[in-house]
Amino acid sequence: MDEAGKVALEYTKALYRHALKHVRDHISKNPGITSFQLIMILLACVPVLVAAPGLAAIGLGALGPSAGGAAAGYQAVHGTTAAFSLLQSAAMGGYGAAVVNGAVTGVTAVSGVVAGFLTRR
């Protein structure tokens, strides 16, 4: 390794040590917000952890609307609207899953950013 490579390697090692110290300090000073941030990162990466139970809670399942559920009541009154079709498709793993998962990812990302700003006030 030439001299420039050695200098770059030492700089990278020092930067890494500094970053780890900064992360440890942040976690020890802000355990609550750190937990929230980790949960938001998890939900942004795996939005189905929220989307699937949420859709099931309103009565949308992999086999269609659950009898007697809120979704079945909505469909009985309003018919099959575009939003209903999209959410049912998401519950069944169809084209709507990308839309719903994208919405969950967006909401969790915004929540994480807003929480970060609120804790600095």
Image: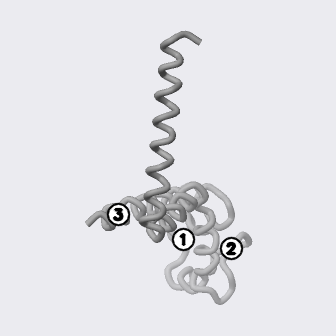
The residue at which mark 3 appears reads as 114
- Which residue lies at the image location 57% right of the left edge and 67% below the top edge? 87
Pointer 1 local density, CA inside 10 Å: few below 14, some 14–19, many at least 20 = some
Amino acid type, mark 3:
Val
C-alpha gap between disc 3 and disc 2: 32 Å
Kind of residue sitting beneath label 2: Gly
Front tag of 3 and 2: 3
- In what element is the residue under mark 2? strand
Q: Quadrant of the N terminus?
A: top right
Q: Residue furthest top?
A: 2
Mark carried by residue 107: none
Tag 1: amino acid: Phe
Element carrying mark 1: helix
Q: Which residue is mark 1?
A: 84
Residue found 46% across the figure and 44% down from its top: 19
> Mark 2 = which residue?
61
Q: Residues within 10 Å of mark 3 (few under 14, many from 20)?
A: few
Q: Nearer the viewer, residue 80 or 25?
A: 25
Q: In the image, is 112 to the left or to the right of 46?
A: left
Q: Describe the element under mark 3 as helix, strand or loop.
A: helix
| Front in this rendered view, residue 44 or 66 | 44
Left or right of residue 56: residue 80: left
